[in-house]
Image: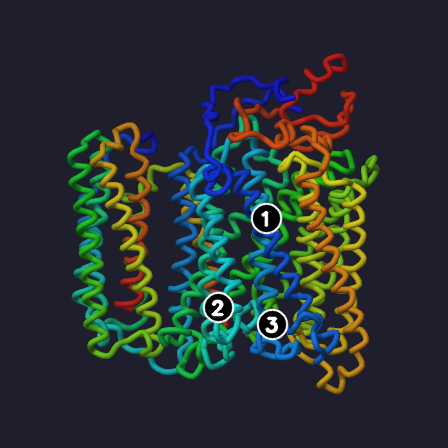
Amino acid sequence: MEAEASRFEPATFQVNDKKLGMWIFLASEVMFFTGLIGAYIILRWGAASPWPVPGEVLNVPITAGNTFILICSSVTMVKAFAAIEEGNQKMLKVWLLATAFIGASFVGVQVYEYTELIHHGFLPSSGLYGSAFFTMTGFHGLHVTIGVLCILWVAMKAFRGSYSQADHQGVEIIGLYWHFVDLVWIILFTIVYLI
Amino acid sequence: MATMMAEPTGVPVRVEEHPQSFIRKYIFSTDHKIIGIQFLFTCLFFLLIGGLLAVMLRFQLGFPGATMPGGSLLPETMAPDGIILPEFYNSLVTMHGTFMVFFAVMPLLVGVYANYLIPVQIGTHDMAFPRLNMMSYWMFLVSGLIMLSSFWVIGGASASGWTQYAPLSASPEASGVSTGQILWIVSIAIFAFSSLLGSVNYITTIINQRAPGMTWLRLPLVIWTLFITAILGLLAIPVLTAALIMLLFDQTIGTTFFLPDTGGQPLLWQHLFWFFGHPEVYILILPGMGFVSEIIANGSRKPIFGYKSMVYAIIAIAGLGFIVWGHHMFQSGMNPALGMSFMITTLIIAVPSAIKVFNWMGTMWGGSIRFHTPFLFAVGFVMLFAIGGFSGIFMASSPVDIFIHDTYFIVAHIHYVLFGGSLFAIFGAIYYWFPKMFGRMINETAGKIHFFLTFVLFNLVFFPMHGLGMAGMMRRIYEPAQYEHLSGIQDTNTMVSWAAFGLFASGLYFMVLFFWSLFKGKPAPENPWEATTLEWTLPSPPMHGNWKELPTVYHGPYEYSHPDMEKDWLLQNERPDVVSPAHH
Amino acid sequence: MSAEGKKKPRYMAVFGGLAALTAIEVAVAFMGFERRATVLLLIGLAVYKALLVAMYFMHLKWETRSLKILAVAPLLPAAIMVIVVLMENF
């Protein structure tokens, strides 16, 4: 036994608990969305009848705009993080609120999109494409909604002065979640709306 | 003992002793030990429910069409005049599987022991996220109660088997159960979220919170198995969640993912389910293997044979677990090339499993064995798991599997690995860690009686099922004698049923013993089994926060019979040169 | 935090890149190229955008190697699942 080798072994990832926990959680989110997106790919690949052309069913220009909105919210989020890294409390609050607002707009546009589609008779019960479309985008929308609520929570804490240049894990991990949701949308937008 | 080594290492201490109200301390507790104990009581309750369902369905198989004693207590929709209806029988089979897999065995392995053991074995104060941990327990309880409640809704509980194959589960018309089916899906979705919270917690804790000196290859094997199990759960269960959401929408809002008439693919459900389901199989066995390794090393008074190969075998089993799921679907029809690949990958799993079995035998070989109750259960595990493993080889070979899958052969197989394997390991773990958890001993003689009853009755129940399966008795069948070729097996079925009632009674005996020992057992010392891992340096039961100062670890987890020492065990925070300097 | 490199990432440049790539994607989808070329191009663009987000916004570029592995690891079982089930449909 190497008794002398009993010094403290540095934690393997050199990452604090919360950030590591968030990355681990995101790993499971990858599998969750793989379940949904994978099912879509499999159903579409194996479909016996011709698949509807997305551009003819969905309103792609509006969603392209919405994609742009979500990218904007990602950049405001990362700006919030950059602000607190420099100890800039004021800009942290501004960017966080901006992110929450832009994120909420994304959900708003999605709700508008859904209403329009349902109005035109495209429903979750409209065959496989309807099933998959509403399930995938719906669960992404749910993730965005949860993200907005969490960002508001973080913003509230920011107003109470809970974050500092030295300690701002909360901002960092909600940022990770938010960018991940953005990342999923990038994939979803391509697969559901464009291909 | 704990005083011997403690060298302060500059790790911040966060134990604060402050009085807590009863509710904060025992009900909405964030202490990993209390949460583990909450899981234990809840799971034992669900284990009892699962057993009761098994007794009822065994009654129908043993005495088809007879009036079940006490059956008149059940409503007309389940058992008019105490005679079990076929529809109710389907619910019984479904819910027996569901309760045993999701609400008894899996949380007993992971919920109870991951929570209880991870912090005390790696040497830390608590989980990385104690509040998430508490939430995980409460969501588990809610999901279990939702599942239980589904018996009393209109149409009864889900009747499409614990595997929930579509389209049976996807359309309200198909199985005749609507509300119960929806409750099943919702309950398991909540369960999945609960176990996700647990997994995140366990993985983070094990990576980040190990005590000074607790390197990866000094981790007790229990921790290794729980770590790998948590990773499996993390990656496999979300796929089930996704599939459940699609199934729920098929049931409720008219989507058609799994309904074939509009282009949906019922086979997609099977793929998604088993992509979760096979890693789930290893979630259900790996922690048991960890407990058994711990107990066998302790009982044999020898270091575990081939520690590193054990670790690699665990990792190999888990890795292979993601590429073998198709072997559950040989009968569903599949591309033969794919079937062949699944068959080969499945057979490869026999290698790491055999490595483990041989390592256990190597550990026992030449040891001065102490046959305490946990050790008996551990040896029982090795034997029964080996039998289950052998029948698994039959199931893995697709040409054979096509004939015996969906018969009682597979019922025998799954019970040998899940009951003879996992549940024996759980019993062993309960006996082994009971003194640490509750500060009292379970009487050894009483425990051994439980072991022998369980072992004998278990084999009487499940071994004949191999034969029943080869005779052609289908799994989940309500009344086999309706087929002429099965008319000769009724006597065997009756015998199996009597043995099953006995097995249930031995389970009740265990429950009584458990609760009796909780209050009347002899007070337990710090280290009753003279074991080596860190939890045995703590008082029984350990205080809130476990350690005032974190221990320092000097060597691997199984230093039994060290040649330089007089006592035959060396705790992980003891240095041999300090314990007996004369010999060094 | 220490994970951050010395140079400050140029977030606005990444943002510009993402916006431009989105525009290109929509254009590609409606250009009427050959079907297979369109699909491959779109997937390539999406993966590149996803990489930009992960590397710069999620700071993966500045993380330790083990965290990078953790981030990429789930893609392996994910890919296995989808590809194997797709093989079923051949």
Is C58 located above or below residue B256 in the figure? above
Provide residue B165's location: percent of width, then percent of height.
53, 73
Circles 3 and 1 on the same chain:
yes
Q: Residue at x 68, y 50 (%)?
A: B511
> What colour scheme governs how the chains and residues are painted in the rendered image of this protein?
rainbow
Tag 1–tag 2 contact (CB < 8 Å)? no
SS assignment at label 3: loop
Residue type marked 1: Phe
In the picture, which quadrant includes the C terminus of chain B?
Answer: top right
Mark 3 surroundings within 10 Å by alpha-carbon count, few (fewer than 14), some (14 through 19), many (20 or more): some
Mark 2–mark 3 Cα distance, whole angstroms, equals 44 Å
Provide residue A152's location: percent of width, then percent of height.
24, 45
The residue to which callout 3 is attached is B74
Q: Quadrant of residue A166?
A: top left
The residue to which callout 1 is attached is B41
| Left or right of residue B507: residue B287 | left
Q: Residue at x 29, y 48 (%)?
A: A179
The chain letter under disc 1 is B
The residue to which callout 2 is attached is C85
Mark 3–mark 1 Cα distance, whole angstroms, equals 26 Å
- In this rendering, which labeled residue sits more in front, label 3 or label 1? 3
State whether residue C90 appears in this view: no
